Image (spheres, helix red, strand yellow):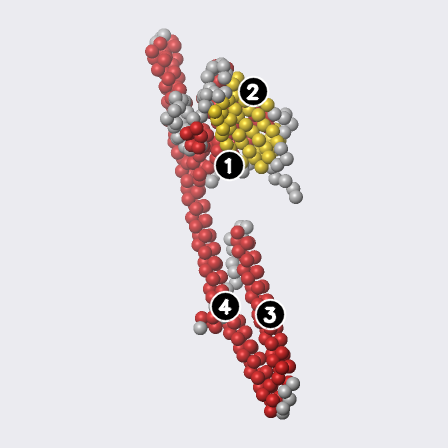
Amino acid sequence: MKILTNQKIKTLFLRIVLCILAFVSFSAAAASFQKKIYAPLCFLGMGIVVLVICYRYFQEQNRMLEDAVAQIQAYIYGNRDARIECSEEGEVYRLFHEVNSLAAILNAHAKDEEKARKFLQNTISDISHQLKTPLAALNIYNGIIQEEAETKDLPDIREFSNLSELELDRIETLVQNLLKIAKFDAGTIQIEKSPENLWELMNEVKNHFSFRAGQEGKEIFLSGSESLTFLCDRSWMTEAVGNLVKNALDHTKKGDCVWIDWGQSASMLRIAVRDNGSGIHPEDLHHVFKRFYRSRYSKDTKGIGLGLPLAKSVIEAHNGTVEVDSQLGVETTFVIHFRIPTKL
């Protein structure tokens, strides 16, 4: 019987059998002396002793299981060396051994993933440097062509060189966003949080797009507390909100506006970017955060389909959520929520 391979169970059965034999012998001896009153007392005593033996056994089993649970929890909370003691035989110890084997396999996979992550990080860094060099050279060459076009008054060359500059800017933006998203996927992005004043952060975003908004006849408005602070990575948060503002500018026309507002409730921080532009078709609402997604209803030629996915990655890296609501031809609002930890 497999159950008897466990030494503790074998000992338990042996003690119960010996207890029964002892009390049966004592009862038989008492009966031979015609002491009938001893028989019920013997059975009562036997029952008590058996209960005590079983109680002590199950108490020890419960302690063993609690120790196993403690080791599993220690592993879950980061102690990769936590293991369950399984030096004996039996089905329970066999289960413990399998759990330990699973922990060892997970550790091996974690090491492999760490190596792969470092390799991907180095590869991304190399690609970034390799791409920046030819792009910088092309920008220099294009600048020389533009200067020649201005000097020799060649309007056609000037027009095409300006278009070439726009396309080079799009390529550079695409490459940078691809690299940033790849870093998020690889888990190599370091989010360094510090208390930041939201008004200063949002004003920085506004200033970044003020020139473009002025050129296109649009306005950007800020609305929110000037003293509200938020624990975040300033650089990445301006990147996320900036991508939402850029998206708003891409889908508005001359005379339209973009509003950035923020506020805080008891347990939630809210940041919203709203515009009164063309809106998003209902069919596209559930796809706007997909990479390279292009709506069949959109006439936009500026976007490359990576700004919103990157913003979503940054926000989620800050343990936040982003949602979108839109009325076609009326307005679009992107709302970011960050939960504020509360002390209980």
Q: Which of 273 and 281 is in front in this view?
A: 281
Instruction: Residue at 36%, 13% (x, y): give it.
Output: 159
| Label 3: few (<14), some (14–19) or many (≥20) C-alpha neighbours in 10 Å | few
| Label 2: few (<14), some (14–19) or many (≥20) C-alpha neighbours in 10 Å | some
User: Which residue is denoted by mark 3 in the rendering?
Assistant: 55
User: Which residue is denoted by mark 4 in the rendering?
Assistant: 88
In percent of width and height, residue 139 lies at 39, 21
Q: In which quarter of the image is residue 53?
A: bottom right
* Disc 2/disc 4 C-alpha distance (Å): 71 Å
User: Which residue is denoted by mark 2 in the rendering?
Assistant: 221
> In the rendered structure, which disc, 2 or 4, sits on the residue that comes first in sequence?
4
- Of tags 4 and 1, the one toward the viewer is 1
In percent of width and height, residue 222 lies at 57, 22
In percent of width and height, residue 179 lies at 43, 33
Q: Where residue 96 is drawn, which disc sits there? A: none
Q: Where residue 316 is drawn, which disc sits there? A: 1
- The N terminus: image quadrant: bottom left
* Disc 2/disc 1 C-alpha distance (Å): 25 Å
Mark 2 residue element:
strand
Q: Residue furthest top?
A: 153
* Disc 3/disc 4 C-alpha distance (Å): 21 Å
Instruction: Residue at 44%, 38% (x, y): give it.
Output: 185
> In the rendered structure, which disc, 3 or 2, sits on the residue that comes first in sequence?
3
Is residue 179 something one can see in this rendering? no
- The C terminus: image quadrant: top right
> In the rendered structure, which disc, 2 or 1, sits on the residue that comes first in sequence?
2
Q: Which of 338 and 78 is in front in this view?
A: 338
Amino acid beneath label 2 = Phe
